[in-house]
Amino acid sequence: MMRADRLATFQESLIREMTRLAIAHGAINLSQGFPDYPTPLELKQAAVDAIMGDHNQYAITWGSRRLREALAAKLHRWYGLDVDAERHITICVGVTEAIVVTLLSIVNPDDEVVIVEPFHENFYPATLFAQGIPRYVALEPPDFRLDPDKLRRAFSPRTRAIILNTPHNPTGRVFTREELQGVADLCQEFDAIAVTDEIYEHITYDGRQHIPIASLPGMAERTVLCGGLSKTYAITGWRLAYTVAPDEISTAIRTVHDFTTICAPTPLQEAAVTAVNFPASYYHELAEAYHARRDKMMAILDDCGFKAMRPEGAYYVMADFRDLGFPTDDDHAFARWLTTEVGVAVVPGSSFYRTPGLGRGLVRFAFPKKLETLDAAHDRLKTGLAKLRQGAVSLSTVG
Ligand SMILES: Cc1ncc(COP(=O)(O)O)c(C=O)c1O
């Protein structure tokens, strides 16, 4: 065996596999969460200007000072957080890297890491890279609430950290102040660190507000806030994110980040200052545009007979397909069939859980798409799902 043992329980990202399948079958890709609408023109121009202005060599390891200062000011403006850009912020290569370097910085071998499932795919590998032991707390349909008793049972004196993503991918939950306070109380009782993934902070619906757990009393000193630029500014390919951490952890994160990447791309960091300084109207329009997408996605699912919790934030919905007449509740079979035969790619629900049995009967739709893309998906779903009602799809045809 040429491969390291630590990879034994890893699978390739199913989301990227679904994307490949979507391309091979000409399916509309509602599996991977990236926008199909353009990046703001001003940002593209800022990136060109940064390159032409010769911001092309290594940046300071922990990131461009202008960008860190802009982020600190924004965190204060939005959430009242007092962040020292010189000490607490590190610019990372995506939240993906931020989570990995954070866990490598705080987790000792055999420390326990609480993971709320269903979860974004990199939390498990990140925990294993750090030789931590994952402990799961499941959010379950129909309302995917954080159950305080289940949460308490997942904590122990060996708990080092909890990874908390809000607004949440894939359920669309935005955790309430009460739910977050429950997490904060346990972190304090068990001397654990909250590692957050707040990449969807600006995508919330129906007047909800994202609350960083670091803003709760006593939590700033035991939270590593991971924030990302990918989704808010439609720049998933720029690979920019940041951690906000208390002094000692911040120093550790900067060291690990240095030895894995040296720094995030310099010209894009410079250009991102323009993004972070966008006026309030930008965020308002972003939320409005996502409202329209969310409402359309829900209308489509409703029209087609799926059952789903209306997302409170982020841009995903977990949809229950068990009433549609598909011959099995196997979510992998349904996702494959929908992608290859109907032409709409989605992700099997169980792939977001590690606890066996959870997520069956569910698939995740991602809707950061132009309204016409969603309309086209609607047409295909209507035609394809009609075949189910006619009984034209049997177990033998879906393999
Ligand atoms: C919850 C969550 N965290 C992180 C990421 C990846 O973030 P980045 O592009 O900053 O690496 C995604 C992407 O879909 C996500 O949904």
Image (cartoon, grey):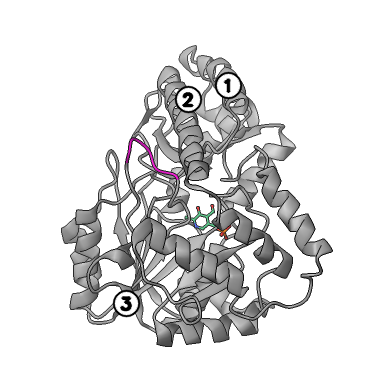
Q: Mark 3 points at which residue?
A: 222
Q: Which residue is drawn at the image coordinates 20% and 70% (left, top)?
A: 186
Going from N to C along the chain, the mark reached first, 2 or 1, is 2
Q: Magenta residues: mostly which secondary structure?
A: loop
Q: Which amino acid does label 1 sit on?
A: Asp
The answer to whether any part of residue 10 appears in the image is no
Q: Which residue is drawn at the image coordinates 72% and 32% (left, top)?
A: 26
**Residue 205: within the magenta?**
yes
The image quarter containing residue 119 is bottom left
Local secondary structure at mark 1: helix
Graded by Cα atoms within 10 Å as few (under 14), some (14 to 19) or many (20 or more), the crowding at tag 2 reads: some
Contact between labelled residues 1 and 2, with CB atoms less than 8 Å apart: yes
Q: Which residue is drawn at the image coordinates 57% and 15% (left, top)?
A: 383
Question: Label 3 vs label 2: CA separation?
Answer: 39 Å
Q: Which of 181 and 20 is in front in this view?
A: 181
**Residue 204: within the magenta?**
yes
From the top left corner, tell me how far across and down residue 331 is, in percent.
46, 39
Q: Which of 219 and 170 is in front in this view?
A: 219
Graded by Cα atoms within 10 Å as few (under 14), some (14 to 19) or many (20 or more), the crowding at tag 3 reads: many
The image quarter containing residue 52 is bottom right
Local secondary structure at mark 3: helix
Label drawn at residue 32: none
Question: Label 2 vs label 1: CA separation?
Answer: 8 Å
Viewed as shown, does residue 357 lie left or right of 387? left
